[in-house]
Amino acid sequence: MAYDEILAGRIRALLVDEPGISERRMFGGLAFLVAGNMAVCAASRGALMVRTDPADADAPYLAAAEPMVMQGRTLKGWLEVAAPDVATDEALAPIVAHGVRFARTLPVK
């Protein structure tokens, strides 16, 4: 299943002024990377994958997020946010910013 192109466009618009952002198709979605590290990913069904420090996963704007599971394995440091929970830019923006902030703490790839 293809990624949600509308969600990808909304993410792109939020990141337009962020330096060092690139895009790459990954995991069946469109990933947004910061210095080579994935920050967020527009996935299928309008879902959003977001990278996080597990210690920060309790941020209020991530309350609806679930642990990311791929092929039956929970991915540490990744959360999935369902489409209804990122339906507005007001809901999407802090989650995208969270992923970008965390990705900026990682070594450049």
Image: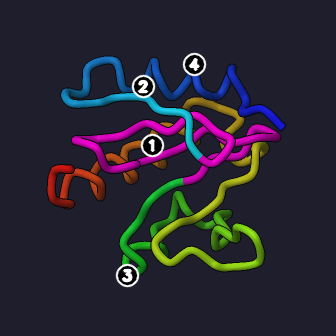
- Gap in angstroms between the C-alphas marked 3 and 4: 29 Å
Q: Which residue is found at the position 38% from the left and 53% from the top?
A: 98
Which disc is residue 55 wearing? 3
Image position of 53 with respect to 83: above or below: below
Sequence-earlier tag: 1 or 2:
2
Three-letter amino acid code at the position of disc 2: Leu
Q: Earlier in the sequence, mark 4 or mark 2?
A: 4
Q: Is residue 14 above or below residue 30?
A: above
Choose the circle earlier in sequence order: 2 or 3. Answer: 2
Marks 1/3: CA–CA distance: 17 Å
x 57%, y 34%: residue? 30
Q: Percent position (x, y) of residue 54? A: 42, 78
Q: Quadrant of residue 36?
A: top left
Are discs 3 and 4 less than 8 Å apart at CB?
no
**Residue under label 1:** 96
Name the amino acid type tagged 1.
Val
Q: Earlier in the sequence, mark 1 or mark 3?
A: 3
Residue annotated with mark 2: 14
> Does residue 87 appear to the left or right of 38 in the view shown?
right
What is the secondary structure assignment of the residue under circle 4?
A: helix
Q: Dots 1 and 3: beta carbons under 8 Å? A: no
* Part of the protein shown in magenta: 27-49
Mark 3, Cα crowd under 10 Å, few <14 / some 14-19 / many 20+, is few
Are discs 1 and 2 less than 8 Å apart at CB? Answer: yes
N-term-proximal mark, 3 vs 4? 4
Labelled disc at residue 30? none
Residue type for callout 4: Gly
Q: CA distance from mark 4 to mark 1?
A: 13 Å
